[in-house]
């Protein structure tokens, strides 16, 4: 059975636009959690770890901490990681990861 860290590590082996789980990135002392690209979206979003703010991944990749962040009413990067970890834990418990 795979453990959660192995699942996240295996996902990070793919290029960013092919990943299915969120991952942290740090630039200029700021950490964001990158949300994988939805099929309908033009770009991924990068959420600040402890704040309800996000920017486009392209802006983050180019400008780092100087990217233009927008407020979000419900989600911060920490929330994205918690939800992904809860989903993976449930799938592991159900035997979906071997």
Image: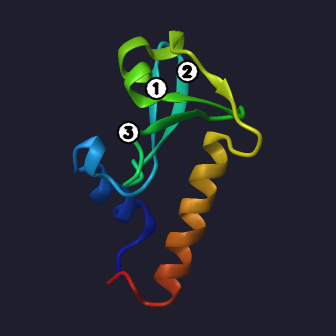
- Provide the residue designation for mark 2: 30
Is the C-beta separation of discs 3 and 1 under 8 Å? no
Q: Nearer the viewer, mark 3 or mark 1?
A: 3
Determine the image quadrant of residue 69: top right
Tell me where residue 91 appears, x and y as whole percent. 48, 80
Is the C-beta separation of discs 3 and 2 under 8 Å? no
The residue positioned 54% from the left and 74% from the top of the image is 89
Label 3 SS:
loop
Q: Distance between the Cα atoms at labels 3 and 1?
A: 22 Å
Label 1 SS:
strand
Judged left or right of residue 98, residue 92 is right
Q: Earlier in the sequence, mark 3 or mark 1?
A: 1
Label 2: few (<14), some (14–19) or many (≥20) C-alpha neighbours in 10 Å:
few
Along the line of sight, the residue nearer the viewer: 3 or 68: 68
- Provide the residue designation for mark 1: 26
Determine the image quadrant of residue 57: top left
Label 2 SS:
strand
Along the line of sight, the residue nearer the viewer: 58 or 86: 58
Q: Nearer the viewer, mark 3 or mark 2?
A: 3
Determine the image quadrant of residue 21: bottom left
Task: Give above or below for 7 relative to 50.
Answer: below
Q: Distance between the Cα atoms at labels 2 and 1?
A: 5 Å
Is the C-beta separation of discs 2 and 1 under 8 Å? yes
- Provide the residue designation for mark 3: 42
Tell me where residue 53 appears, x and y as whole percent. 66, 30
The residue positioned 46% from the left and 50% from the top of the image is 22
């Amino acid at each position: 059975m795979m453990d959660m860290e192995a699942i996240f590590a295996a996902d990070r082996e793919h290029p960013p636009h092919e990943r299915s789980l969120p991952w942290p990135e740090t630039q200029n002392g700021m950490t964001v959690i990158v949300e994988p690209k939805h099929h309908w979206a033009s770009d991924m979003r990068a959420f600040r770890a402890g704040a309800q703010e996000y920017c486009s991944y392209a802006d983050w990749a180019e400008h780092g901490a100087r990217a233009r962040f927008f407020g979000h009413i419900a989600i911060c990067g920490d929330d994205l990681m918690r939800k992904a970890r809860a989903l993976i834990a449930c799938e592991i418990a159900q035997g979906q990861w071997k």
